[in-house]
Amino acid sequence: MSDELLNLRNRIDHLDEEILARLSERARCAQRVGEIKQGNIYRPEREAQVLRRLADINPGPLPAAAVQRIFREVMSACLALEQPLKVAYLGPAGTFSESASRKHFGSAPNFLPMPSIDDVFRAVESGNADYGVVPVENSTEGAVGGTLDLLLANPLKVCGEVKLRIHQHLLSRAEGIGGAKRLYSHAQSLAQCHEWLNRNLASLPRVPVASNAEAARLAAEDPESCAIAGEAAAELYGLNKLASNIEDDPNNSTRFLVIAGHESGPSGKDKTSLVCSASNRPGAMHALLEPLARHGVDMTKLQSRPARGGLWEYVFYVDIEGHQSDAPVAAALKELSDRAAFVKVLGSYPVAAI
Ligand SMILES: O=C(O)C(=O)C[C@]1(C(=O)O)C=C[C@@H](O)C=C1
């Protein structure tokens, strides 16, 4: 080994010791914070601020995203010393919902796969889980209606959002696609890879199943089957990646919401989600949203959905920039509430930091 290589490795060992000593000191600080702070231990607003600040002051050469991933794990481990979290997500294990949950909470919590979105809400409501992660919209498929309906009917709050790039891979136990007789995947994933499949595997029968993870499980059992699923399912079932990133839209992404029994405090860069309905008069919807523009509050999403029970024809899911405790947002929401037939603030939460 050259002298230079030896010296550099000694230097790295020394730096690792310093980092470890500092990490231990940080963990002790977090433990003490856990003892003295009142109320909830998990603070989404503080975590978002920590991650944003580190990206801002990052001197390089590590990319900001890599620094954020490292500190995401550091905070996850520190939080676990204060309180081990239970996080419910739409299972089974290996789904994109699991990846979203880990992206948001790091790997320290106990992750609980649930058979349906309804069960994720129930797990949090009953206290069997501290938090839940549910998909709310996909850039190609649109809104997840089931989540929107449950948000309206349920007392839980939205305390965070996660944005996940969805990369689909062709997976198999076999080394090549030659012997494949069938392809399993969730119908949405088959749709997201439709053009690629038509170009490359037009004659292979496509079999829709309940989830991508289930598709990967089936492919793991049978070398004559292959699956389309994400990275997490590929790893979980030890499958070979025969083709990577085969989604037709390279920007394919899904947004998830974190649901909880409590809200998030303001982080300085927040969003507020609400659901409302206007009375059945001409111009009522315009009148309802007009206070937002007047108070300079930007609307980032407006999604209509048929109302259940026929009391109103439609309900509108609205996302606005800012926290409900910010003065312009509070003023706009007050006026909107005065004009609406119905309004429910689902929660204010930090804009996804990573
Ligand atoms: O600042 C806090 O409230 C902490 O508990 C510390 C800490 C962290 O590790 O930085 C850990 C968990 C919280 O969710 C937020 C931040």
Image (cartoon, rainbow, N blue to C red):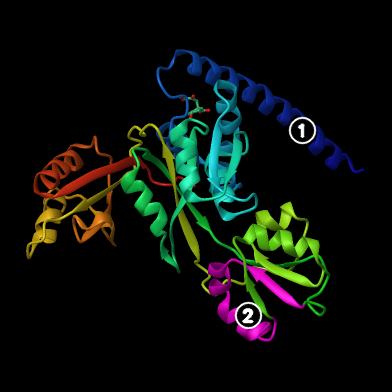
| Disc 1 element | helix
Question: Would residue 241 be found to the left or right of residue 353 on screen?
Answer: right
Eyeballing the image, is 206 above or below 268? below
Residue 280 among magenta residues: no
Mark 1, residue position: 11
Residue drawn at 70 percent across, 61 percent down: 216
How many numbered tags mark residues here?
2
| Disc 2 element | helix
Magenta stretch, residue numbers: 181-204
Residue drawn at 59 percent across, 66 percent down: 186
Query: Relative to the observer, which residue lies in front, 7 or 100?
Result: 100
Query: Residue 255: in sight, yes or no?
Result: yes
Residue 267, numbered label: none
Mark 2, residue position: 197
Question: Would residue 137 be found to the left or right of residue 297 on screen?
Answer: right
Eyeballing the image, is 176 above or below 254? below
Query: Residue 59: in sight, yes or no?
Result: no
